[in-house]
Image (tube, grey):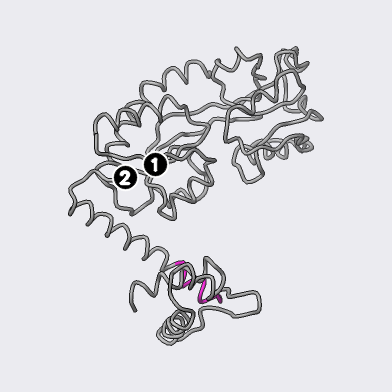
Amino acid sequence: METRDLEFILAIHAHGGIGRAAAALGITQPALTKAVKRLEAEVGLRLFERSARGMSPTSAGALFIERIRAIHRDYEDVLTQMRAIQSGTQGILSLGYSPSVSDAIVLDACRQLILDRPAAQIRLRRMLAPDLLDLLTEGSLDLVVAPVPKQRAEEFVVRELFTDVLTVIADEKHPLLRKRKPKLADLIGHDWLLPGSHVAVRQHVEAAFRKQNLPPPVLRIETDFSSRSFIHLVRNTKLLSIASAAPKLMTEGIRSIRLDPQELDLRRQIAIMSRAGAYMSPLAQRMISIVEQHSRRVRPTWRGRSE
């Protein structure tokens, strides 16, 4: 089996057919078909089901693809490491961070890295945590700064930075703010602005309502939360949402509805994460060190202001 055969199988799975995969790879369809037959003969099992709609993996093929994807990532890691040794350059760092993470940590760390390493290049992505972790898993990102996932944690090397505190927010004139000790039940029937159902924050909020046998939040606006500008949608409305407890929001006419943490605990750990078993370049190691330093400077301010 050759390493290019692994690329062929992954391309067919990604594109769903021989024709599209061959075009993407820049080879002929007969050559790709021959490669698949050769691999199927070697493993002794059919890897794909063929239909008018294209090709999909068999149960054996799905297992095969899962394993060779890991092998292919490891192979690419080795090549990356060898190229770095050969060239002696600092290379390129691909870093992703969640919108829930303070720019003061990530962007200041990037600024320091390019000052420390003049030859370095940084590819910076700002996306939702689930999307970032998918890119980290597939090897498109080297590092991610985001909330620690409750699932899939074994896939990553997690270096915790600080505890982030979220809170329910509302316009400063919202009637709920007149309640001295609001309960989760007081939020029933109010409209919400929340992220998609795949995002951990929304799942956590809905689980808190279910735990008390309360009806779920009334979703009025769904957003991907990739930008903090969504907070402006809450101003001068009766919408409720979730945001950082940092007091800078209060200057925008937004106030926090402080619920009992036993009813709704929105604390979470922020970490810098890498893929377990991946090659860690000197540039990535330096960025980890810088981010940890910056988070230690920012962390007391966040904690003091949030609590």
Give the vertical position of 8 relative to 217 (above or below): below
Residue at left 52%, top 49%?
151
The reply to whether residue 66 is visible in this rendering is yes
Residue at left 58%, top 75%?
55
User: Residue 78: x, y in percent?
Assistant: 27, 59
Label 1 sits on residue: 123
247 left or right of 303? right
- In terms of secondary structure, what is the magenta stretch mainly? helix
Residue 123 counted in the magenta span = no
Circles 2 and 1, Cβ within 8 Å, touching? The answer is: yes
Q: Which residues are magenta?
A: 57-66
Element carrying mark 1:
strand
For badge 1, the amino acid type reads Arg
Question: Rounded to the nearest whole Å, what is the CA distance between mark 2 and mark 1?
Answer: 7 Å
Mark 1, Cα crowd under 10 Å, few <14 / some 14-19 / many 20+, is: few
Give the vertical position of 254 relative to 107 (above or below): above
- Using the rendered view, name the quadrant where residue 291 is placed: top left
Name the foreground residue: 214 vs 50: 50
